[in-house]
Every structure is written in C-alpha cells, then in structure tokens.
Image (cartoon, rainbow, N blue to C red):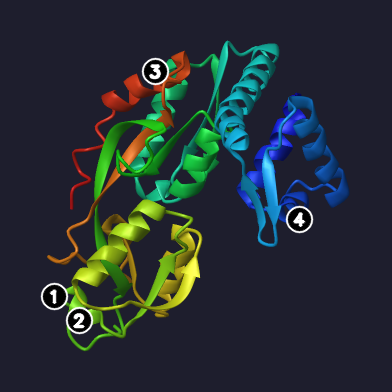
C-alpha cells in the first residue's frame, strides 16, 4: 500500500466516480481503475462497490478512507516541512485566509506580526473560501485557516475565535432596487439575490436559508458564485442583493448594508486547524492571534 494509490483512492471517493476522479487528477481512466484494483488486491478486500451512479464505499473502504485522509495529510506535511528545512527554514506553516481579508485590516496585522516574531518560519498563504479551506485543512493541503465557521460546523477541526462580523443585506445605494429602505426580510419577497454555491460556505448558506424560511419567503436567486469579491462586484452593478458581512459595504459610497432584526446572524471568524494536530507553528500563530485585537471593532 503506497501513498500514490491512497491518493488515487481518496480522489475516487471524493469525486464519487472513477471517471470524474480520472479527469481531475488527471490520469487515464483505465490506469486509475487498475491502481484501485491493485490497492484492493494488496489489502485483500473490496473497497468500493460500483453502480450506475458511481462508487460506494464498503465497510472496509470506509475504514480505509477515514484513516487515509489522516495518513496522506501527515505524509504531505512531513514532505513540506522537510523541504522548508532544506531551504534554510526551521519550520513552515501554510494557512488559508478568507477571500475578503483586504476588508479586515486586522488579518494583515496578524500575518505581519507573525512574520516579525517568527522570521525562521516560512509562511505561505492561500486565499480561499471557508468550505474549500475546511477541505484543505482536513486533507493536509494547508496547516490551518482563517475562515468563517461556527465552532460546531466541523467536528474534525479545532478552532480559536478571532472575530465576529454582523451579516446584512447588501445592495447598490443608487439607484436602489426597492422604493423604500427595507425593515425585514419579508420586504425582499421576489427580489433578485446573488448568493454562494452551498459548497463554498455550507454552514453560512444553511443558516441564511433558515432565516428566509422563517420569514416565509423563498429567495429569488438570479446568480450563484464561488467567492465574495465576485458577488460584491455583481451587487455593485445592480444585478441584485446579497447577504454578506456588512463590513463589505463600509467605505464604499456605492453600497449600503441593511442589518435587519429578523436576520440576527453574527458570523464568527475563526483560526482553525485539524483536531489534535496543533503543531508548534500553529501554537505560535494562536499566541499572535490572541495578541491582535480583532474583536474590538468587528461587532456591527
């Protein structure tokens, strides 16, 4: 059982089929099928059941998948840190940062302080949304992330709260899409909305959807996107409304944020890492994060 076969196996499970995994890796489909078969033969057990929809894990396959995620992450982490040492660094730390970090100055302060206090640690940054960050942390592609997530959203992560941001309905200020300033979500019945794909921020997506349900309306979604900046840009053109952190409208005369009583969502910004995997680098990052006063001015 080698690490390459395990990575192929994880890709097949994550993509749901050998065909999709072969395109993503990329590798020829017959070659990928053979690698999975060799893995099964080496372990002496069937890992996947095939059907017309794709693949389904067997009981043995489920056990291997749960452990392979950790094993592959550990191997990749060791390789990354070995390369850092060979380049003259004592340690390395790769972290994800939210795509709206330019609107949160304290994140830049956190990164700057860490670099100053730990000059021998090679720090690499990856800008991505919360959903992809979670996946990247669990798969070992990054060590930690600064993302919007509720503490209970992902049980396989440990978290440190570093900020809280009020969510609001954001729209272009002039000309507005409504005749009068809204006072509740019900005022947006039938109004065009721009939102994330659920895969981008699943926890936030579900909470917002619940508040629409509570208001007795179904949002009229005219466009789905994968990142905050694209959504913000489309809102600025007047295409529709979006529910996002109200901080995204501050300092922009073309945008206005409506914080509504029946949308009482405060989105927590977390420093997150894989549960039980708090390395010295992550420990240092936590200490710096606690010294940077992210919380003071974030509550809208």
For mark 1, what is the residue?
183
Q: Are marks 1 and 4 in contact (CB under 8 Å)?
A: no
Q: Secondary structure at mark 4?
A: helix
> Residue 283 bears which disc, if any?
3
Name the residue rendered at 47%, 23% in the picture: 115
Measure the C-alpha gap from mark 1 to mark 4.
49 Å
Q: Secondary structure at mark 2?
A: helix
| 30 to the left or right of 298 | right
Query: Of callouts 2 and 3, which one flags the residue occurring earlier in the amino acid sequence?
Result: 2
Q: How far apart are labels 4 and 3 at the CA level?
A: 41 Å
User: 241 or 117, which is in the foreground?
Assistant: 241
Upstream in the sequence, badge 2 or badge 4?
4
User: Residue 19 bears which disc, if any?
Assistant: 4
Q: Is residue 227 left or right of residue 266?
A: right
Q: Which residue is mark 2?
A: 187
CA gap between label 2 and label 4 equals: 46 Å
């Amino acid at each position: 059982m080698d690490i390459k076969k395990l990575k192929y196996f994880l890709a097949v499970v994550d993509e749901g089929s050998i065909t999709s995994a072969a395109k993503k890796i990329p590798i020829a489909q017959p070659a990928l099928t053979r690698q999975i078969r060799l893995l099964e033969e080496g372990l002496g057990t069937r890992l996947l059941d095939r059907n017309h929809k794709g693949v389904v894990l067997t009981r043995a396959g489920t056990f291997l998948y749960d452990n392979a995620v950790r094993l592959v992450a550990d191997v990749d982490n060791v390789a990354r840190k070995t390369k850092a040492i060979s380049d003259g660094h004592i340690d390395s730390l790769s972290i994800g940062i939210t795509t709206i970090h330019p609107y949160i100055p304290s994140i830049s302060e956190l990164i700057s302080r860490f670099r100053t206090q730990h000059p021998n640690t090679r720090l690499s940054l990856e800008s991505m949304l919360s959903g992809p960050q979670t996946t990247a942390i669990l798969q070992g592609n990054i060590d930690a992330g600064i993302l919007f997530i509720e503490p209970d959203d992902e049980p396989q992560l440990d978290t440190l709260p570093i900020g809280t941001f009020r969510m609001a309905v954001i729209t272009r200020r002039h000309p507005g899409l409504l005749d009068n300033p809204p006072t509740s979500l019900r005022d947006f019945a039938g109004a065009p909305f721009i939102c994330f794909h659920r895969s981008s921020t699943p926890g936030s997506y579900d909470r917002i959807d619940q508040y629409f349900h509570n208001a007795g309306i179904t949002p009229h979604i005219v466009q789905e996107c994968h990142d905050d900046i694209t959504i913000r840009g489309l809102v600025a053109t007047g295409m529709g409304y979006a529910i996002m952190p109200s901080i995204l409208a501050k300092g922009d005369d073309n945008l206005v944020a409506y914080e509504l009583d029946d949308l009482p969502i405060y989105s927590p910004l977390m420093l997150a890492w894989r549960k039980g995997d708090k390395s010295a680098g992550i420990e240092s990052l936590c200490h710096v994060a606690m010294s940077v006063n992210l919380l003071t001015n974030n509550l809208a």
